[in-house]
Image (tube, rainbow, N blue to C red):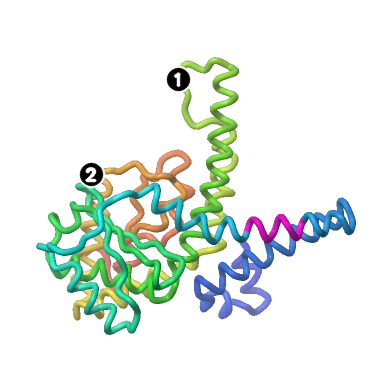
């Protein structure tokens, strides 16, 4: 709805071309301004000072906590020294071409092929790859996936991804806490997603959409295809990753789904709200002009 309104008043180009860091900065600026305004309207000058302190604290918390939180959720082992998959060499060559420092590569003991990247800047960037990625896919497919994540790092999409994840995660944690409290008081025998989670989930997903530009996936896809010299290879990689996600599902916090090269969530229940990336079908069609392969 918001995009339709903006289109009618002639700002479609701005919406489409706005990159992730700019979009995130704009969102946090508006969020901080609203905090100041609400504080002033309720408590006057004292409320303005309180709102200012709250805005500064929240921005600091979101900026620094987002990266730390993701590192704590997805713990793995850094690849260094012995590297039978040549991942370090691949990433170093990609980083040289992109003129950025090579990110750390962290491997997690997960047999479902997947990958994502984190970091608020180039120096702190990490690419997390699953063991299943290097063992289940060809070398060119692995290169294409790494190139996709390197493209996100180069454009600082990882900062926006982390901010969106922190905001959505805070909302969902509050909702889960309220549901657990109610279920404990009501002595619910088989607790599941409760009322608060059902209400808050769409809002949390909206926060992700407000901070992350879906066009960044298409741009990273194009870079990945160019890196291996054949868009068919990365299109095949996307198709495989989607197939593995469906047959070897993994449990992740809903607020982190947009980080992955292919969304690992099902479309059932509250999961459906967190499919904020373009569909794999549309990404493949964008790459090679058709779907299915």
Name the image quarter holding the C terminus: bottom left
| Vertical relation: 176 (above or below) 77 | above
Secondary element under disc 2, as helix, strand or loop, is helix
How far across and how far down the image is residue 39, in percent?
Answer: 81, 55
| Residue situated furthest left in the rendering | 84
Q: Residue placed at 86% from the left, 51% from the top?
A: 42
Considering depth in this image, is 63 or 152 the residue closer to the camera? 63
Q: Residue placed at 20% from the left, 69% from the top?
A: 88
On whether residue 190 falls in the magenta region, the answer is no
Q: Residue placed at 19% from the left, 47% from the top?
A: 111
The crowd level at tag 2 (other Cα within 10 Å; few <14, some 14-19, many 20+) is: few
The crowd level at tag 1 (other Cα within 10 Å; few <14, some 14-19, many 20+) is: few
On whether residue 56 falls in the magenta region, the answer is yes
Main secondary structure along the magenta-highlighted residues: helix
Report the side of 171 relative to 248 (left or right). Answer: right
Label 2 – label 1 distance at C-alpha = 26 Å
Q: Earlier in the sequence, mark 2 or mark 1?
A: 1
Secondary element under disc 1, as helix, strand or loop, is loop
Asked whether residue 215 is in view, the answer is no
Query: Which range of residues does the magenta coloring cover?
Result: 51-58
How far across and how far down the image is residue 94, in percent?
Answer: 25, 78
Residue 247 circle label? 2
Provide the residue designation for mark 1.
190
**Between tags 2 and 1, which lies in front?**
1
Report the side of 153 relative to 179 (left or right). Answer: left
């Amino acid at each position: 709805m918001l995009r339709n309104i903006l289109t009618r008043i002639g700002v479609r180009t701005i919406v489409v071309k706005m990159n992730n860091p700019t979009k995130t900065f704009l969102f946090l600026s508006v969020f901080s301004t609203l905090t100041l305004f609400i504080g002033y309207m309720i408590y006057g000058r004292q409320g303005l000072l309180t709102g200012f302190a709250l805005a500064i604290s929240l921005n600091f918390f979101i900026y620094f906590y987002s990266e730390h939180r993701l590192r704590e959720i997805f713990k793995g082992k850094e690849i260094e020294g012995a590297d039978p998959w040549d991942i370090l060499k691949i990433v170093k060559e990609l980083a040289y071409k992109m003129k950025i420092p090579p990110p750390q590569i962290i491997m997690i003991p997960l047999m479902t092929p997947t990958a994502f990247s984190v970091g608020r800047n180039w120096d702190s960037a990490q690419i997390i790859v699953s063991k299943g990625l290097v063992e289940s896919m060809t070398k060119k497919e692995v290169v294409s996936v790494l190139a996709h994540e390197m493209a996100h790092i180069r454009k600082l999409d990882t900062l926006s991804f982390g901010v969106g994840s922190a905001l959505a995660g805070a909302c969902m944690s509050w909702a889960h806490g309220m549901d657990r409290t109610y279920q404990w008081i009501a002595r619910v025998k088989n607790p599941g997603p409760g009322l608060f989670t059902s209400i808050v989930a769409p809002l949390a997903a909206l926060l992700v959409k407000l901070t992350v530009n879906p066009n960044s996936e298409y741009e990273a896809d194009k870079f990945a295809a160019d890196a291996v010299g054949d868009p068919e290879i990365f299109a095949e990689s996307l198709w495989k990753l989607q197939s593995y996600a469906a047959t070897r599902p993994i449990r992740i916090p809903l607020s982190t789904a947009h980080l992955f090269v292919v969304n690992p969530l099902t479309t059932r229940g509250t999961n459906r709200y967190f499919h904020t990336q373009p569909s794999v079908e549309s990404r493949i069609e964008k790459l090679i002009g058709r779907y299915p392969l």
